[in-house]
Amino acid sequence: MFAMSKQDAEQVSEAEIAVHWGEEKLIQPSPEFIAQANMTDEKIFERFSLENFPDCFKEYADLLDWYKTWDLTLDTSEAPSWKWFVGGLINASYNCVDRHLAQYKNKAAIIWVPEPEEESHIVLTYQELYVRVNEFAALLSDKTGLKTGDRVTIHMPMVPELPVTMLACARLGVIHSVVFGGFSGNACGERIADSGSRVLITMDGYYRSGKLLDHKVKADEAVKTANKEGQEVEHVLVWRRYGDRNASEAPMVKGRDHFVDELLPAYRGKRVEPVQLPAEAPLFLMYTSGTTGRPKGCQHGIGGYLAYAAATSKYVQDIHPEDVYWCMADIGWITGHSYIVYGPLALGATSVMYEGVPTFPDAGRAWRIAEQLDVNIFHTAPTTIRMLRKAGPDEPAKYNYNFKHMTTVGEPIEPAVWRWYHEVVGKGKAVIVDTYWQTETGGFLCSTMPAIHPMKAGSAGPAVPGIHPKILDEDGNEIPRGANKAGILIIQNPWPGQFQTIWGDQERYVETYYAKFNKDPKSKDWRDWPYIPGDAAMEAEDGYFRILGRMDDVINVAGHRLGTKELESACLMVDAIAEASVVPVNDEIKGKVPDIYISLKPGFEASDEIKLAVVKTIEESIGKIARPKNVWIVPDMPKTRSGKIMRRVLASISNNQDVGDITTLANPDIVEEVRRMVQGK
Ligand code: PRX
């Protein structure tokens, strides 16, 4: 959905609600779940009311170990960049590893499940994790000279060496920027350049759908792209999938590339004291897509982020140290950072990681893993739930696992899919939370508290403790609470998990997330800076929020954000193309996927070669996840009189919807021509 006017937003929501999403019935959590839950006290919402803001968040920060407690809970002097727990000293690696040794030294921290079923799982106990993190931190500082405040880019798949690498960085105060392994070398290179990383940490290869993919080859492309953008990469550290052989055919560049397994023995037994860092120092950058072609490096601070990730893991995910928790996201996205690595490990839990495709080699794989490891908390995205349902709707019943709790995240879930998740995957017993949040927010914004609120299919639930949303109209007027009317979602107050800025672009940060409803740009009062996540939403009478989708030029593909501008600029790299326009088209499994419209420069003829060139260029510049559903070569784009391409019209055509009023267009006739081409009638 693009820059929706108020009227558009209302049309979309009313249509969606009328067709698919009537009010669903409420389902209560079971007494067994409530009896063991971490949070059953409804008073938490009073404790986290706006009157008690910001000091209420002490309750979350107290879940962590501090070298020195903070003097000031919230510093607003650089509004709207909020600093939490100022004066406090902390280390995230210490909190996720060292502090658990006394009690849980011999307990599994990470259980890694390789994709090939014949390979053994790897279990890292907290002691083993401690040793590996220390040795790799020693290697990093010695071999690469990385130190507090430097950035490092990590482009790795789902292997246990990834959290080891992240925690080693956190130990040194080195700011990590993990790039999703499925992104292309070029996309990685752009992020290396933007973050100013002079070290890249990668992997030789990994398994997907039974194939050992060459991943190191992307590192070479990444370094090339970074160089072109003026960033030199001095060191490329390459972890190997198998210690004794190479999964990549890409040559190692002498002096630049090093196999980690060859360097590590020199650091055996080395220990690195965790650096005592200011709470507000950056922990990591996580790039996400926005309205312009350039991805944004969302900067998260240590103390606030970790407190929020730990508390929401404890109270919303209901993680106890004795649970076996499996989040099927990729660590290359924010969900993996907060809810595979930092949140669960801060609580001393056992976090399961899976290398590959959930339906490989067959539709029962995920449930076999759950049965074998006795997983009792399961966390995934609607796109995966749809895929699992399609591949094997009756598979879960064949396996003897027991989920007490399940999560859905990243995109709206249709009630029918939710019901399958509840009845078949959760066997009617597991409680479900639908968690709404973003890369920028560090942790959940809306979700039911699983032992306090009933569940409602298709609704993210009320705001979590300490989050105070409102829905506004285009002019900033409040839509009355519980009115069931669509509008712009805002959060009235800051919270500790929130990102601090966009790396190197404070102006874009203020402009994108705050400017619209701020009346005084000089104000140091948080009340003047409502946060704008960029989603349309509506609040039902019972206070449950339904998220209707993005209001900016972002497409949510399989729960991953892709900027339409990023895709369009990739298309324009193909010589024949004059103009490109990218719109979201509904997809049964992935929620939305991009449909691409292109027009050609004079002298070029439409051909399959051009279409293929577009697909290839997109895969190379962004990655396979951005692969379009269709490429349509059109004689011209529908345009306004001022020459703006009407994406809304193209989106309606792609989705077989009514194109609405087109009389004001400069070229209304083209609409019918394009419609016939796409819809074939
Ligand atoms: O549009 C919302 C959608 O995903 C966006 C955030 O994407 P990203 O930063 O990649 O993070 C995804 C994982 C947290 C949001 O702006 N979204 C996220 N969760 C939900 C959702 N839409 C509906 N329901 C959700 N539970």
Image: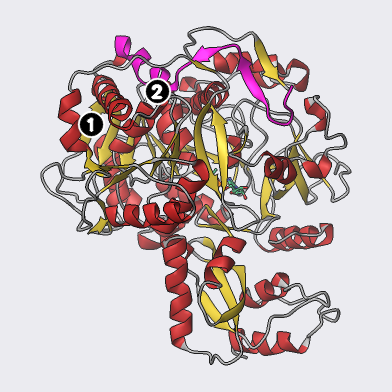
**Which residue corresponds to the image point at 14% horizontal and 48% vertical from the top-left?**
118
Q: From the viewer's perspective, is 376 left or right of 85?
A: left
Name above or below for residue 116 compared with residue 51: below
Can you identify the residue that label 1 sits on?
123
Say whether residue 642 is magenta: no
**Which residue corresponds to the image point at 64% horizontal and 8% vertical from the top-left?**
71
Tell me where residue 112 appears, x and y as whole percent: 27, 38
Say whether residue 86 is magenta: yes
Q: Which residues are magenta?
A: 77-103
Element type at mark 1 = strand
Nearest to the observer: residue 92 or residue 578: 578
Can you identify the residue that label 2 sits on?
172
Q: Are marks 2 and 1 in contact (CB under 8 Å)?
A: no
Element type at mark 2 = helix
Look at label 1 and name its amino acid: Val
Asked if residue 409 shows in the view, the reply is no
Residue 169, quarter of the rendered image: top left
Nearest to the observer: residue 325 or residue 131: 131
**Which residue corresponds to the image point at 67% horizontal and 75% vertical from the top-left?**
650
Q: Residue furthest left?
A: 244
Question: What quarter of the picture does the C terminus occupy?
Answer: bottom right
Reading the chain from its start, which is encountered first: label 2 or label 1?
Answer: 1
For the residue with label 1, is its CB less than 8 Å from the closest atom of ligand 1?
no
Name above or below for residue 71 compared with residue 268: above
Q: From the viewer's perspective, is 457 left or right of 397?
A: right
